[in-house]
Amino acid sequence: MPKKICLYLILIISFCQSCNHKSESTSNNDIPIYNFSTLEPLLYTTTNKTYIVNFWAMWCVPCVKELPYIEQYANKNPAVEILLISLDFPEDIDTKLKPFLKQQNISSKVILLDDPDANTWIDKIDPNWSGAIPFTIIFNKEKRAFFEHTFASLEELEDTITETLNL
């Protein structure tokens, strides 16, 4: 097989694996780095499956407070796709982010968004979003809601998802 075709196949396989919304293991060994154009397709669906996308960072105290509730929800609802989008620094993935996720027992899929043009991509996600985190999107193909606050409990998160999607 020509080298060019082989390279394309490797790239396609790598891209497909990085686009999975759920981590296959609980170790978060691979934390891919996305820019907004590669992230954007993950923010929409054509299915009735429920998605929860949460923008957060390790340095954000309210974000860290709500992560256990999102993780508990994920464990209770395995059919729901959870995507945690870290806004931390790429150079901190191995030294800070991975140890943090392990310490917090976070097994949901984590990606890191590294796109300096926040003024553009924040408005594309939701023109009403100030850019503050945590920021959560709950959606399926029919409904979409944005939350620019911290979920204070698992029950609040569950109630919000039920009300948002009329489950």
Image (tube, rainbow, N blue to C red):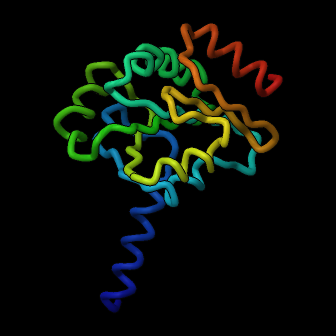
- Residue in front for this viewpoint, 133 or 3: 133
Which quadrant holds residue 145? top right
For residue 68, above or below residue 9: above
**Where's the N terminus, which quadrant?**
bottom left
Which residue is located at x 74 percent, y 51 percent?
46
Horizontal side of residue 112 vs 152, given as left or right: left
Locate residue 87, reporting x and y percent: 39, 38
Q: Please determine whether, in this image, residue 40 is positioned above or below residue 163.
A: below
Q: Looking at this view, is 118 or 125 the one in front?
A: 118
Q: Is residue 132 above or below residue 89?
A: above
Q: Which quadrant of the rendered structure holds the C terminus?
A: top right
**Does 1 sit above or below residue 36?**
below
Residue 96 placement (x, y as % from top left): 21, 32
Q: Quadrant of residue 17?
A: bottom left
The residue sitting at the left extreme is 95
Of 127 and 99, nearer the camera is: 127
Left or right, 112 with reference to 160: left
**Could you tell whether 114 is left or right of 153 in the image?**
left
- Horizontal and vertical percent for residue 144? 74, 36
Residue sitting at 49 percent across and 40 percent down? 22
What residue is shown at x 39% (from left), y 52% (from top)? Answer: 116
Residue 19, position as x, y percentages in the image = 49, 53
Q: How many marks?
A: 0
